[in-house]
Amino acid sequence: MPTSRRLFGSVLGGLALVGMAAVPADASHSWNGYHWARTTNLFTLSLGDNVSSTWDSILATTSSDWSQSTVLDTTVVAGRAASVKRCGASTGRVEVCNTTYGNTGWLGIAQVRVSGSHITQGVVKLNDTYFNTATYNTVPWRNLVMCQEVGHILGLDHQDENFANADLGTCMDYSNDPSTNQHPNQHDYDELATIYSHPDSTTTVGMAVAGSAAVGGNDPSAWGRAIRTSGDARPSLYERNLGGGRAVFTFVIWAE
């Protein structure tokens, strides 16, 4: 990352209105303030590579894209998941897995464990049952899903959840045509700068967290209660309350 980019911070900017699909200039798509605890900016978050060769370049693109942020970097490291089907989480980092998870209905999920307001671990799962089909076996679809799921684990929500709206040029936007929605846009980077504008007194990045455990599962029955639906009336976010201020959230991108 160029040194000059680190010398100035981003401020929350507006997007020009594009019909009814535009995001207002003062819109926020922080995910309820959840963030990785860290004592300084910049911080580096590890993305564990448990993916096949088909996905390696996609993971590299996503890591490079999110590392354009002024407040964080991501780096691809060796994966720690003993089973890609289970894709167990590791504290202080993200594990990324792909396999044929079956006819689950979902293309990809991001499962995020939190303690209080702090993210402690995350998992991205990519379902090759659908990505092996002609509809989804494309670079744009792979880029959109990977980029969006990692974005959630950084603390971002969607910019828009209506598939019928005009595309916003960001992977954090729901789209029926991912060709222009493969990467973050400036609004995503500005929002990250806002989320991570104040350091914490401790860190959850790269650190073992007391009481940590595997996150999620592969079936909605293991995800707890649906707490939000998208524009197509399908659940887009689930919460499993673990008690004591701890929870696991599951973001879902469904196949059509």
Image: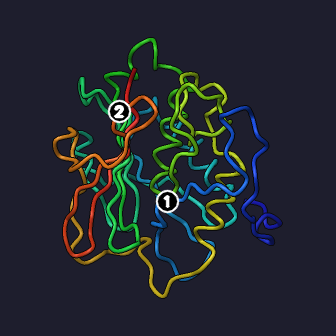
User: In the depicted view, which residue is nearer to us: 74 or 24?
Assistant: 24
Position of 175 with respect to 220 (left or right) is: right
Q: Which residue is mark 1?
A: 155
Mark 2 nearby-residue class (10 Å; few <14, some 14–19, many ≥20): few
Where in the figure is residue 247, as x and y percent of width and height? 27, 63
Instruction: Identify whether 119 is placed above or below 99.
Output: below
Q: Residue at x 28, y 58 (%)?
A: 248
Mark 1 nearby-residue class (10 Å; few <14, some 14–19, many ≥20): many
On residue 115, the disc is: none
Outermost residue toward the top?
134
Residue 202, located in which quarter of the rendered image? Answer: bottom left
- Secondary structure of the residue carrying tag 2 is loop
Instruction: Identify whether 134 is placed above or below 187.
Output: above
Q: Which residue is mark 2?
A: 234
User: In the depicted view, which residue is nearer to us: 135 or 116?
Assistant: 116
- Secondary structure of the residue carrying tag 1 is loop
CA distance separating discs 1 and 2 = 22 Å
Q: Coloring scheme of the render?
A: rainbow
Task: Please state which amino acid type lies under the numbered disc 2.
Answer: Arg
Where in the figure is residue 88, as x and y percent of width and height? 25, 53
Outermost residue toward the left?
221
Looking at the image, tell me whether mark 1 or mark 2 is earlier in sequence order.
1
Quarter of the image where the C terminus is located: top left
Where in the figure is residue 235, as x and y percent of width and height? 33, 38
Position of 84 with respect to 130 (left or right) is: left
Q: Residue at x 52, y 46 (%)?
A: 158
Q: Residue at x 36, y 21 (%)?
A: 130
